[in-house]
Image (cartoon, rainbow, N blue to C red):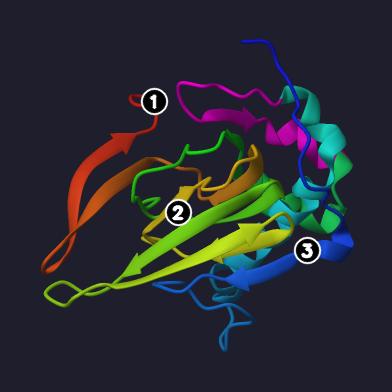
């Protein structure tokens, strides 16, 4: 399919809204002891990257494709992105993986996590719905749902379980940042006693 860019909501720095997702999310802010600050602030750093890249539509709009059969995904080379970003983001970018995704109406992910990677995603066009499932083994899981319009940013820690779907009638585009780089993703279903892992996909094998 040839690349195409469909009209969507306009994103600007003035419309961006960053939110921390519920569930097993790591701490945000400065750590109390030396040596902890990188881990503690990582989700926030990924959110800043996702925001900065989402507003720079000139970097990715010409790449976007829409596929009827499945969501379209594209790995963005971080070396190509660095010159367009503020130098303060370069260190975070060097340790991250950046994906560009498009979503036609009805397309979405299964319920999944990102293994040991933390991350963030920004809705750059359209709108997406996120379902978050959190809970400990043997206890009923807590579920929440949020509609995320263009300009919304979500960030999360490792082993965070969610599902993202385009439930509306317009295509959507989002920018996703993960650190460390994705090595596996687990999919789940919700059972009577909590989350049940269904499968594991591995980098280099399944994507």
Tell me where residue 34 appears, x and y as whole percent: 59, 81
Residue 30 vertical position relative to residue 50 in the rendered view, above or below: below
Q: Secondary structure at mark 1?
A: loop
Q: Residue at x 78, y 63 (%)?
A: 16
Q: Earlier in the sequence, mark 1 or mark 3?
A: 3
Q: CA distance from mark 3 to mark 2?
A: 24 Å
Q: Residue at x 65, y 23 (%)?
A: 65
What residue is disc 2 on? 117
- The foreground one among 206 and 19 is 19
Q: Is residue 61 left or right of residue 137?
A: right
What residue is disc 1 on? 204
Q: Residue at x 57, y 47 (%)?
A: 168
Q: Is residue 189 left or right of residue 9?
A: left
Q: Residue at x 39, y 55 (%)?
A: 116
Q: Which residues are magenta?
A: 64-83
What residue is disc 3 on? 16
Q: Is residue 200 left or right of residue 87?
A: left
């Amino acid at each position: 399919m040839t690349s195409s860019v469909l009209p969507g909501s306009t994103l600007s720095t003035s419309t961006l809204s960053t939110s921390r997702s519920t569930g097993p999310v790591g701490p945000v802010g400065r750590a109390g002891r030396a040596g902890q600050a990188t881990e503690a602030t990582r989700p926030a750093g990924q959110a800043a990257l996702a925001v900065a890249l989402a507003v720079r539509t000139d970097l990715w709009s010409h790449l976007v494709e829409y596929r009827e059969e499945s969501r379209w995904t594209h790995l963005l080379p971080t070396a190509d992105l660095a010159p367009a970003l503020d130098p303060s983001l370069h260190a975070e970018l060097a340790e991250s993986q950046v994906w560009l995704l498009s979503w036609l109406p009805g397309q979405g992910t299964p319920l999944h996590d990102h293994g040991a990677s933390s991350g963030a995603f920004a809705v750059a066009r359209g709108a997406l719905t996120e379902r978050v499932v959190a809970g400990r083994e043997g206890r009923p899981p807590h579920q929440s749902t949020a509609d995320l319009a263009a300009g919304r940013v979500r960030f999360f820690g490792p082993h965070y379980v969610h599902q993202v779907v385009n439930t509306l009638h317009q295509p959507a585009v989002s920018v996703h940042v993960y650190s460390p780089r994705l090595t596996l993703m687990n999919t789940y279903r919700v059972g009577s006693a909590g989350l049940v892992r269904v499968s594991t996909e591995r980098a280099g094998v399944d994507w």
